[in-house]
Image (cartoon, rainbow, N blue to C red):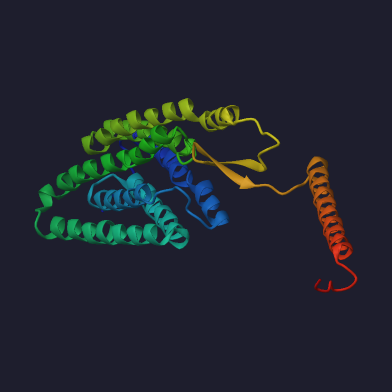
């Protein structure tokens, strides 16, 4: 079991405390996102994979720190991280569509329960005590790399749609800052398994912030472009144009309009008056024909000569 803290590594302890503070902000960064999900009762375009992988990583780092000496700061932050990620996953499952819910539960069972239990059993019974910490350390390197790479699916969505609606900047910023702190912590603690994955985390965090800077105003620009391309309305077309923006793409849908102005009312009244006049003329013509037919008939039946 780990000792109280990394007191004999002053710089490692300092960066470890800073890492705990920043990582706490990382774990709390999705709170506005899940409040939005709770308020709208919908997960919209958000994905659960990053949160499942993050929870899996926190569970493994907690197990790693419990076996390693002088790693209490890893225990504190990863116990909090596991709780936070579990909360997010529960909220996601409650409000996700059926297919997304089934996929999330399936991945949770396979990865967070099945795979973690397998690693726990194998490392405890099949790996000797002398190699247990290094083996777990390199497993954590691979998993932590996946944690930092998991948002790549969102990065691909940002590039494809040119919208950062579903890539929170706050989360990207704190991930980058957290990677710096934990890299320094692992460096001064002389633990390469902690330092290596945070190099990738720093690079990917910078990439996400760069994409955010590039596409943060893109949605409004696309809507304005669509508005410029819309054809001018003519009196012969009784339709409105509705722009529905989803992500960064806008769709133009024609919708039948209701007569709601004076010109339309005047046209309707004029059409009604013309129709009534025509019906009146037809009635007069019909009556005239009937009178004419009566006048042409003889008063008496003609006799034969």
> Looking at the figure, which quarter contains the N terminus?
bottom left
User: Does the image show residue 257?
Assistant: yes
Q: Nearer the viewer, residue 231 or 148?
A: 231
Query: Where is residue 259 drawn, in percent x and y?
Result: 75, 47
> Looking at the figure, which quarter contains the C terminus?
bottom right
Left or right, 175 with reference to 109 = right
Left or right, 184 with reference to 220 = left
Q: Nearer the viewer, residue 269 or 153?
A: 269
Q: Is residue 96 above or below residue 49?
A: below
Using the rendered view, name the quadrant where residue 83 is placed: bottom left
Q: Is residue 89 above or below residue 301?
A: above
Q: Is residue 207 above or below residue 77?
A: above
Q: Nearer the viewer, residue 46 or 161?
A: 161
Query: Where is residue 141 drawn, in percent x and y?
Result: 23, 41
Q: Nearer the viewer, residue 99 or 130?
A: 99
Using the rendered view, name the quadrant where residue 146 is placed: top left
Left or right, 146 with reference to 216 = left
Query: Where is residue 149 drawn, in percent x and y?
Result: 30, 39
- The structure residue drawn at horizontal position 44% and vertical position 46%, both measured from the top left corner, is 27
Q: Is residue 235 above or below residue 294?
A: above
Using the rendered view, name the quadrant where residue 262 is placed: top right
- The structure residue drawn at horizontal position 39% and vertical position 32%, both measured from the top left corner, is 159
């Amino acid at each position: 079991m780990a000792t109280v803290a990394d007191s004999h590594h002053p710089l490692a302890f300092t960066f470890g405390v800073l890492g705990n503070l920043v990582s706490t902000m990382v774990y709390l960064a999705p709170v506005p996102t899940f409040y939005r999900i709770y308020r709208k009762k919908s997960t919209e375009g958000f994905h659960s994979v990053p949160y499942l992988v993050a929870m899996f990583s926190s569970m493994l780092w907690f197990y790693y720190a419990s076996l390693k000496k002088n790693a209490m700061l890893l225990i504190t932050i990863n116990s909090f991280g596991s709780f936070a990620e579990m909360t997010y996953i529960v909220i996601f499952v409650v409000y996700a569509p059926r297919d997304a819910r089934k996929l999330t539960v399936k991945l949770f069972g396979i990865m967070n329960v099945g795979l973690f239990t397998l690693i726990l059993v194998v490392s405890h019974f099949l790996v000797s005590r002398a190699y247990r910490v290094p083996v777990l350390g390199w497993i954590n390197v691979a998993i932590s790399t996946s944690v930092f790479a998991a948002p790549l699916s969102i990065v691909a969505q940002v590039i494809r749609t040119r919208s950062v609606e579903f890539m929170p900047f706050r989360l990207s910023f704190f991930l980058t800052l957290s990677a710096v702190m934990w890299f320094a912590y692992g460096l001064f603690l002389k633990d390469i398994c902690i330092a290596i994955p945070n190099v990738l985390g720093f690079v990917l965090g910078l990439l996400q912030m760069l994409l955010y800077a590039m596409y943060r105003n893109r949605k409004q620009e696309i809507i304005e472009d669509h508005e410029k391309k819309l054809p001018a309305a003519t009196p012969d077309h009784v339709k409105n144009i509705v722009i529905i923006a989803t992500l960064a793409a806008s769709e133009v849908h024609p919708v039948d309009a209701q007569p709601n102005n004076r010109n339309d009312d005047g046209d309707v009244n004029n059409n009604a008056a013309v129709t009534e006049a025509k019906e009146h003329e037809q009635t007069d013509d019909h009556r005239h024909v009937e009178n004419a037919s009566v006048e042409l008939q003889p008063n008496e039946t003609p006799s034969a000569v």
